[in-house]
Amino acid sequence: MRKLISILAIPLIAAACTGSATGAPAGTASSAPSQPVAQKYPVATGADSLILQIASEGGFTSPSFQLTRTPLLALYGDGRVIVPGPISATSPGPLLPSLHQQHVTPAEIQKIMAAADAAGLLGPDATYGGPGMPDAPNTVFRTTVAGVTHLINASAEGVAAQTTLGDFENSILDLSKMLGRTVADDGLYQPAGINLFSSVASQPDATQPIVTWPLAADPATAGGTTLVDGVRCLAVKGADLATFLAAAQTATSVTIWKAPSGEYTVSVRPLYPEESGCPAAG
């Protein structure tokens, strides 16, 4: 376990220490062509410009999971694609999530947008399917073209009924097959910040490891409230990010964090390029 978490944390610590942006790791060659590509689908080209996001929302899950859930896929104007990495088979799992990145070219972004258009993602906002199974999450597609964001929300039944949605989702989640080339894994996504969600530890047992809270900000009062009662959110960036990640190398999902004000449980949600901090509390 120690080795796995250390591998996850080291690139993030390096990014925080150097003030690195959330672009590709140093030494990664850009796959973008030198010549401009005609845009049938005008999209922003910034590194923090979200073009397409596919996410699961709702469903019967724990409140902490709702706060830390990450998208199934996020595509940005610089061609970066952020996807969840492999899930650890160990239990308890590591505290630090594993997100990986890939890169596509401007021409391939246009191909993806054409497929999104054919799937009906660039039309009016829509909701497909009824309440469906109450335990199942909905799939939410957010697509931004020509400065306009289109939102499609579909239950499992809605995705099944709108077969083009299901076909598009299955296709883009296998980029190599969709684009007809091997889309390499460019390594861990290195966020510029993380959200720390903390709550008072409830009757911790002797088997739970204890780590000293490394930040000057007190988890009892720092940050702000969330939609989940008793859970606070603190956005951590810069030097504080490096400090926390160094302390979290050996932490798991059940680690207890001991601060002067008490003992806390903590979960982590990396910030995506377009995100700046904690979600609104209501």
Image (cartoon, grey):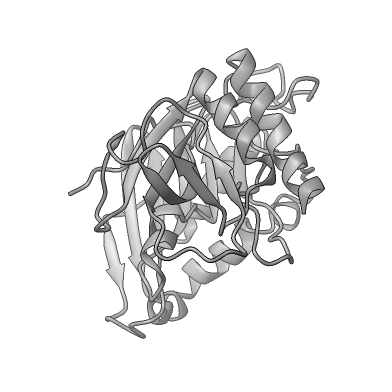
Residue closer to the observer: 196 or 192: 196
Tell how many labels: 0
Q: Is residue 162 above or below residue 33?
A: below
Taking the spot 27% from the left edge, 56% from the top edge, the residue there is 125
Left/right of residue 160 with respect to residue 88 in the rendered view: left
- In x, y percent, where is residue 282? 17, 49
Q: Is residue 123 visible?
A: yes
Residue closer to the observer: 271 or 236: 236
Q: Quadrant of residue 90?
A: bottom right
Q: Identify the residue at the far bottom of this view.
A: 133
Taking the spot 33% from the left edge, 83% from the top edge, the residue there is 134
Q: Quadrant of residue 16?
A: top right
Taking the spot 57% from the left edge, 39% from the top edge, the residue there is 110
Left/right of residue 258 with respect to residue 128 in the rendered view: right
Left/right of residue 147 with respect to residue 88 in the rendered view: left
- In x, y percent, where is residue 140? 39, 60
- In x, y percent, where is residue 272? 48, 37
Residue closer to the observer: 155 or 15: 15
Q: Identify the residue at the far top of this view.
A: 18
- In x, y percent, where is residue 30? 74, 24
Left/right of residue 7 with respect to residue 170 in the rendered view: right
Quarter of the figure that contains the N terminus: bottom right
Q: Is residue 46 visible?
A: no
Q: Quadrant of residue 178?
A: bottom right
Q: Is residue 180 above or below residue 137?
A: above
